Amino acid sequence: MAKIQIKDLVKSYDGEYKAVNKVNLEIGDNDFCVLLGPSGCGKTTLLRMIAGLETITDGDIYIDGVHMNNVLPKDRDIAMVFQSYALYPHMTVYKNMAFGLKMKKVPLDEIDRRIQDAAKYLDLEEYRDRKPRNLSGGQQQRVALGRALVKKPKVFLMDEPLSNLDAKLRNQTRETIVRIHENAGATTIYVTHDQVEAMSMGTKIVVMNKGVVQQIGSPEEIFEYPDNMFVAGFIGSPSINFIEGTYSKGAVTFGDTKFKVLKDQEKAMDAYEGKNIIMGIRPEFFEDMADIPQKEEDLNLISMRINFVERLGSESIINGCVNDQKVTAKIRHTHRYAIDDQIDICVKAKKVLFFDKETRQAIGREIR
């Protein structure tokens, strides 16, 4: 286990473009920390800086209190799993897993024991004498995981290790990686652009955009209490709805709809009296009025014209318009809907997020 501290970390190219910009991050012992963001956000660069594979322009990295800026990758007690597997094609599974240990001059009987344990754990026993070209993508990825596991590192670093696998194998390998993390007790840093991977695997998520950390929190915090519109929009599928309206006297008005906020939300909204703000409503928080036995106090009714319906069996994803603003709702499939139908949907005020139109930051985080 290891504690990792990152202080004011910067990576710039040509003295101008900053791939990583003033990142501050603390990762605790046995954390499963996911670096999440779109392509080009700086997450892989940050991971490579922690690994020692990328030079640091400014700032500091500490592992268990030891300053790592000038420590060689081989001396950092880390193991890295790459997107491309990076197996030696001329070596068998056994030799691929043994190579790093031999370089460290681990005794041969200890190497054999570790590989036997890892092969059994990863269901690779019958493949130990095969070469990578005779393995499926999922098997190759398990070999890459095994090669990292046998090193017994303080820190696992994983750079989008599942992106080359199909959906079924991704699900299976996600479970394997989480089990490895829990059983090995090593701190894990995992890079992905896939929010499902992040939400299902991480204990801590770091959302990045354009080299800057947007928010750090648990999966629940990131989903329910995003700090800004970027985080709110990046997390969730289907994506959150952003609806612009004008706030006045306890309600947000957009078109013919007046959306009442809760009493304890009004104080945070006082500074926006008469101003345009952005409401954020996740599709799954909508309900069909026909499914509500009786109206609850904080329920707001919204009228929606349907443009398209995706029927998914037990639920439907409805794409439509509310006063000319596009809205997506995910509703239990208890009714039949058709294009151009006008339906009434509702949402509880406590489920709605509010954002400053100019700064794009969340309003009223302290009351959530």
Image (cartoon, rainbow, N blue to C red):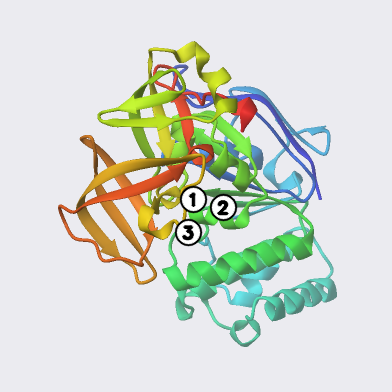
Q: Earlier in the sequence, mark 3 or mark 2?
A: 3
- Report the amino acid beneath label 1: Gln
Q: Is residue 82 visible?
A: no
Evaluate if marks 1 and 3 touch, with contact meaning CB atoms under 8 Å apart: no
The residue located at (51%, 14%) in the rendering is 270
| Amino acid at dot 2 | Met
Callout 3: few (<14), some (14-19), or many (20+) C-alpha neighbours within 10 Å?
some
Give the side of residue 302 with respect to residue 138, left or right.
Answer: left
The residue shown at (62%, 36%) is: 216
- Kindly check if marks 2 and 1 are in contact, taking CB atoms under 8 A apart as contact: yes
- Please name whichever residue, 156 or 286, is drawn nearer the observer in this view of the structure: 286
Asked which quadrant contains residue 51, the reply is top right
Label 1: which residue? 195
Return the residue at label 3. 84
- The mark found on residue 199 in the picture is 2
Name the mark nearer the viewer: 3 or 2. Answer: 2
Up the image or down, 252 lies above or below 90; here it is: above
| Residue 194 rendering spot, x and y as whole percentages | 47, 52
Comparing 291 with 274, the one in front is 291
Helix, strand, or loop for circle 3?
Answer: loop
